[in-house]
Amino acid sequence: MAALANERVAYFNGKIVPESDVLIPFRDRGFMAGDAVFDTARTVRHRIFKLREHIDRLYSSLRYIQVDPRLSPKEMTAITEEVVARNLHLIDADDDYWVSQRISRGSDSADSKAGTGMTPTVIVECRPLPLTQRARLFRDGIDVIVPAVRRTAPDMLSPRAKTHNYLNLVMGDLEAKAADPEAWAVLLDANGNLCEGTGSNVFVVRGGTVMTPRERYVLPGISRATVIELAREIGQPCIEADIDLYDAYTADEAFLTSTSLCLCPVRSVNGRHVGVDAIPGPVTKRLMDAFARLMDFDFVAQYKRRLNG
Amino acid sequence: MAALANERVAYFNGKIVPESDVLIPFRDRGFMAGDAVFDTARTVRHRIFKLREHIDRLYSSLRYIQVDPRLSPKEMTAITEEVVARNLHLIDADDDYWVSQRISRGSDSADSKAGTGMTPTVIVECRPLPLTQRARLFRDGIDVIVPAVRRTAPDMLSPRAKTHNYLNLVMGDLEAKAADPEAWAVLLDANGNLCEGTGSNVFVVRGGTVMTPRERYVLPGISRATVIELAREIGQPCIEADIDLYDAYTADEAFLTSTSLCLCPVRSVNGRHVGVDAIPGPVTKRLMDAFARLMDFDFVAQYKRRLNG
Amino acid sequence: MAALANERVAYFNGKIVPESDVLIPFRDRGFMAGDAVFDTARTVRHRIFKLREHIDRLYSSLRYIQVDPRLSPKEMTAITEEVVARNLHLIDADDDYWVSQRISRGSDSADSKAGTGMTPTVIVECRPLPLTQRARLFRDGIDVIVPAVRRTAPDMLSPRAKTHNYLNLVMGDLEAKAADPEAWAVLLDANGNLCEGTGSNVFVVRGGTVMTPRERYVLPGISRATVIELAREIGQPCIEADIDLYDAYTADEAFLTSTSLCLCPVRSVNGRHVGVDAIPGPVTKRLMDAFARLMDFDFVAQYKRRLNG
Amino acid sequence: MAALANERVAYFNGKIVPESDVLIPFRDRGFMAGDAVFDTARTVRHRIFKLREHIDRLYSSLRYIQVDPRLSPKEMTAITEEVVARNLHLIDADDDYWVSQRISRGSDSADSKAGTGMTPTVIVECRPLPLTQRARLFRDGIDVIVPAVRRTAPDMLSPRAKTHNYLNLVMGDLEAKAADPEAWAVLLDANGNLCEGTGSNVFVVRGGTVMTPRERYVLPGISRATVIELAREIGQPCIEADIDLYDAYTADEAFLTSTSLCLCPVRSVNGRHVGVDAIPGPVTKRLMDAFARLMDFDFVAQYKRRLNG
Amino acid sequence: MAALANERVAYFNGKIVPESDVLIPFRDRGFMAGDAVFDTARTVRHRIFKLREHIDRLYSSLRYIQVDPRLSPKEMTAITEEVVARNLHLIDADDDYWVSQRISRGSDSADSKAGTGMTPTVIVECRPLPLTQRARLFRDGIDVIVPAVRRTAPDMLSPRAKTHNYLNLVMGDLEAKAADPEAWAVLLDANGNLCEGTGSNVFVVRGGTVMTPRERYVLPGISRATVIELAREIGQPCIEADIDLYDAYTADEAFLTSTSLCLCPVRSVNGRHVGVDAIPGPVTKRLMDAFARLMDFDFVAQYKRRLNG
Amino acid sequence: MAALANERVAYFNGKIVPESDVLIPFRDRGFMAGDAVFDTARTVRHRIFKLREHIDRLYSSLRYIQVDPRLSPKEMTAITEEVVARNLHLIDADDDYWVSQRISRGSDSADSKAGTGMTPTVIVECRPLPLTQRARLFRDGIDVIVPAVRRTAPDMLSPRAKTHNYLNLVMGDLEAKAADPEAWAVLLDANGNLCEGTGSNVFVVRGGTVMTPRERYVLPGISRATVIELAREIGQPCIEADIDLYDAYTADEAFLTSTSLCLCPVRSVNGRHVGVDAIPGPVTKRLMDAFARLMDFDFVAQYKRRLNG
């Protein structure tokens, strides 16, 4: 099938094809069981940011679910860069892409319970960042709701692996969106500590210290790691810790990190204003600035330009 | 695309098509997030067994993840029967089908976190039962291994909903298969009680009582419910209870139920012989016989005929 | 101080006094530590309903926190009846009262940690039922929200004792009200099962069976016990069980019980409609009718008369 | 009402009044639900020690339960100082005061579940330290008993907020006092680690390191923070850690901190002598000395002077 | 070595020998690891009570730890009876014996971690019941203390197997005895429910119902089973349930069962009187009488005769 | 009894005797209840390595179970050295000994539940290291299996005390050996983190950091402490952390430490190869080398010399 002139292309099991040709047989375990992992980087001014770190995490996820992608990290990196390159002409200079690798265990035959011996399905694809939809968050801050559903515990399925099993997080989002369609869910872990939302890590600032949940209970976000590192560089105390609703309710500031957001302030948790200062608070602001310096790119401005678009 | 002469057909979003045409866009949330539910019945002599119960459970799963399939249970039933009917000519008289409905939330647009407002993807498909591969189990009994990974807790994602999020069970299977490629995994729940394996429920017989894990922690199997009902009818005490490895190690008999197996004896748990009697034990045998009478079909003979095929 | 003509009176440490004279020294442990228990019955057509059961439960709460009220159950009963009698002239014939006994451990001296040897503070007081404010609930059903905060576990402070330590429930209400000021919170217990809200017990109806959380995790409501007993009488299966969000989301009906509501239908849980039928559903309706018959009083009509007041 | 000549005064909702006029309407949620927070500092030679830290913690507690006291921290500080000043003439030069702020959510109207929109009740009051009653503890050490009841878990009600919900701690004290009326209870948290007693933090010394439970599970005591800081200053290793009965039973030394005690040695835990050295042990002694230097006041001598009084 | 004239004999690995010759090599895993199981019956008027049930339970314990005693249940029964018979001449007519089988995995060789292939050590021995020491308990009731240490959870080592690993219970006893040397410890399980003490099961009576902890968390005592059965026979409601301190503190009666005590009333729990009636309470008394009738022996009189001995 | 010429001797309650004379009365609580503690050091070229640390830990274990050995640490040290000295002539120059102190609470009298007042049984004994049996592990690496049974939780019986209650670990070994007779079990703790195996501590290396489970959940191995210290000395980051199966499956290297092994590489966990490098990996190798340097002894060579013996 010929690709439309403005259709994105993707890598699919060895070939670059139009996205509409990336079609998964329904017996693929990625569809039947969410038996797949992925990772998602973003471009910054059309160049992929921290791709190596994302590829490393992808291969950890693969090892965790014991799938061999039959591509080396180096090959995966090259494919990823090619997919982005082939799609850059489809976005404006001020837009950017998410770019994801997705590898499923492959197609199921009749009785292979644990799915050994299959040929993995490999997709590398990109998608424009939802800059316009999320622009408001940088002006107003994110409203966080903590749902009753708890994040899957690490001894059941480690949140550190980025898999296609997202229903636990979907259940949390359904709860939060029922209360406020604009809210973002951040779940508690099995011990009642704040852990993470769909694709986002959470940080709170209290008494001059930046705190984020310990890695065991969350996806170790690349943006999260970046913030921890930047904090060290700018002399801002920053620790991994058990954080709970007391911390959130008494915080001076809070923010979420994610690949797309980089770092975005939180306005409220469960309807309560976080802190008493402006959005973003001073510590958040310093870290946002440091993040922008690191990327040599004003990601906040990129978002905010969409506010009156 | 024209179906091959011997290719099965399936229902796919409103049409009956060859299975090879049931192709899922990779942005479908069923693929990206395992954000889908399913249910699977089997045919008995080419007629679907307890389809109403399976459809009921399917609609409970749909309500749980809040997806509206835009088909009534009655329509879903009719489609399911049609799919089987259209494929019966492809199997022998002594073979039978699994038949499954699969409904995903639909395709993801850029920023719709909880996925409201999507058009669900609906598939109804069938597949021959793996009678030959599993025939041995009815002669020898199943070797069960209890992995270290625990079953997802009900306050994270209820095991009672039959979803496409199977990685927790896959992790258990990987552990069990590493120890013995022929073994079946049965996991412990968050409290350390036996709960379930991939698609199977477990029963133990101790001191004349049949026991199976409480519904809260497992998929409420239709075969499981059938056994509980049959036990009542034949005067065999049968309870839902917290069952643990002490029960398994000191059991007189044990068996698994599943849609395909109906009821199949367990030979060992973690390498220890269950009971001292023959396979199947007397209570298991009585329940197997009752099951066969209910179906008016000797399912064990159907399996065992494959032993020397 | 002279009571206002229309002021209610209450029993306070041996005397009947105007309510405005029931003033607690701030060093009373009831104020300083919530170190007090209470119980609340209601009148039905101006007569106290099931007072004996409430007095029994009060004395269990007293034993649990080891406070001796220095009044026998019989004396407490007589006082309670007197307090109601003295206040009846202040309400209309179609209104009714809550009537509560409240006993604190007494006043703290400097260093008595566990508070032995104090003189308990005893209050018996009544208050008109909020019939008008809650009338809408009988027409529309209650919107339930399940907050993230979990109910205090029984090995910390038993929910079965009705104490003045309500902050755990207050935290749940704050979460629920932030999402919807009209919603009622029903909390999960430490195991992730639904347990109770502030002063209310929850029931769900699934597959023809009425289920309510097990007593260990909730206040054993008198209305709850009444419903369990009525169900038995009218042949409606009703069990105590572990109930979770799967049950709530897939329920056919749900309702809350409390002293004031008796039994009131639930419309939604976390924004999801419960069942597909009218409010109240058929099983709820039968139990409401049976409750009214038992009281020989149409409590629903009493509420609904306020709808157009 | 005129205050007795020797009666203490207190601040009560805007006025300084005799303590006997600080009377709480029984419908105040502080009485009905323990829906209130407080904080307690002490004077050292008639001057309030670390008042700013106590006020800060008070405002964190207020934020946690979402009560606005309608007084700024500065105003609260001034009131607190005034209350002490007005009462100093009532105690001897060698005595000192506890001084507490107590803020409840206010009085309940008929149907306001979560209690928004009420006028908070504010009390600031002082009370002489029980120096005589506790003098013995500085000579003999405290006998600690660990009760079976566990401390309320942070995801139910955070122990970090200092609230009027003390029944969980009261239950622990009742257990401990039943075994030994002189003993102090120190509870285990939900994970089985030592956490805290009524108003006290616990420290153990093992292998040269001072350890105290992590903040998430306890009230972050000001004396506790002082000890941690002093340890750093004098080069004594001191960490927050998970501490359990193994640590307590094999400890070289142990001590409690509280506002009144500052720092007082523990003699035994569950009937077992802690360490083999004198009371206090050498590390405890160094920290006590450092504490006294910081306050420029020999608090131990103040206690011990009462021994033969 | 020749036995003393008045020395008891025991069975030891195939022979009847004087007790002083039953000496265990220190490398026996029973000594090195507590890697052994046992069971203990008692005589009633010199005949072993319910020996079959004890032997059954012994063989369940053996299967659980996977040790084959190389003796059939029938042989074990005969040996047990012989051991008693050979020792009867050493006790008075009004005395009785405990008789125990003890089987360890055998002696450890250098590197056999899980101890397969060893020759088990088998001991059958008896010991006079401590009738005099415990006589007081039948007059006064038992004082129960609930220690802070929790009973080993079933997913770690099942309490249902009667093993030589008693340190968890020893730790509980040490706590209880430190508070009161005469008290008996009854532990909480991992969920905070009452479970069991060293060799004893606990029952509480509340509202006319007898309740005992569920089997999963305790040794399923033969006396416990006897009481459950007797209750059924005399029409006394009796259930297995989750029982906690609320139940104990508000109970009307409580009692312990054990092989030696049969059934003995509890006077207090954590220093609180259980119920308000005499020792034993009426329900306890009826069950004690029924127990005596079943044994055709007044076991209480046997104990009480020692009171003024 | 005269010792055989080649029989080892041991210390037994005050005397040095042939090992075959170290016979434990079966009523010793060490046999009946595993009510005993021990510690085990090894010789390095016939000299005891880190004996002081082992004696210290032994006395902590004794304090934890509240047994007084009636020997000072100094006396225990001298006895230990004597026992080794008396047995050295029985092994070759290239062999070495394990040497253990074992102290039980002593012999049980009829009714002494918590066993106060007994005379402890003290044994000091040695045994040749199983160098030949384990030589292969240094060539191939250890295959680790994580069983389903969880390690006893610290609030039940602290794993930090080295006691004779090993059945929990035995149950884990039975599971692992059933899957692979050569495998070593490493258990998960109650939180699902890796903790320890029978006598071994586990380390994983990820991203350049060496991690080992936190002390609260494991026996604080002397070899474990040595590795932590050596890592510090050679500049290798090394932390105590919560480690789970995600860490194990994605580790670059892993190793076990124990008194006999010192430090031995792990080849696989649950059938999955750890890392992709040779055995041992580079970090493991550096630590092994540092360990050998510290001991001034090539322990690996000592093992490997047995490979072709």
Image (tube, coloured by chain):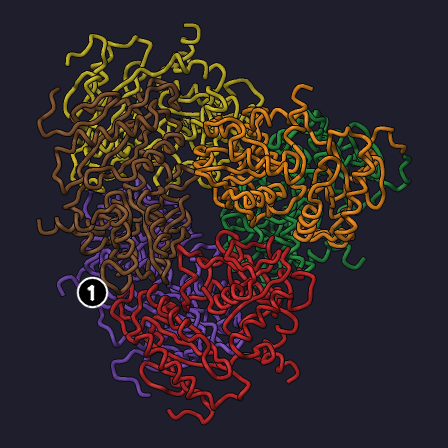
Chain colours: A yellow, B brown, C orange, D green, E red, F purple
Residue B107, given in percent of the width and then of the height, sits at 30, 21
Q: In the visual, does C180 lie left or right of A109?
A: right
Nearer to us in this view, A221 or C292: C292
Image position of E290 with respect to D111: above or below? below
Q: In the visual, does A122 lie left or right of D189?
A: left
The quadrant of the image that shows the C terminus of chain E is bottom right
Residue F281 seen from this side: no
Residue C84 quadrant: top right
Image position of F251 with respect to C148: above or below? below
Residue F33 quadrant: bottom left
Q: In the visual, does B301 lie left or right of B245?
A: left
Residue A137, given in percent of the width and then of the height, sits at 45, 17
Give the mark count.
1
Residue F287, given in percent of the width and then of the height, sits at 29, 50
Residue A170, given in percent of the width and then of the height, sits at 39, 29
Residue F133 quadrant: bottom left
Q: In the visual, does A156 lie left or right of A106?
A: right
Query: Which chain does tag 1 point to?
Result: F
Residue designated by label 1: F132
Image position of C35 with respect to B9: above or below? below
Image position of B39 with respect to B214: above or below? above
Query: Residue sitting at 68 percent across and 39 percent down?
Result: D34
Nearer to us in this view, F71 or F26: F26
Mark 1 nearby-residue class (10 Å; few <14, some 14–19, many ≥20): some
User: In the image, what residue type sits under mark 1?
Assistant: Thr
> Residue pushed farthest top?
A309
Residue C215 seen from this side: yes
Asked which secondary structure carries label 1, the reply is helix
The quadrant of the image that shows the N terminus of chain E is bottom left
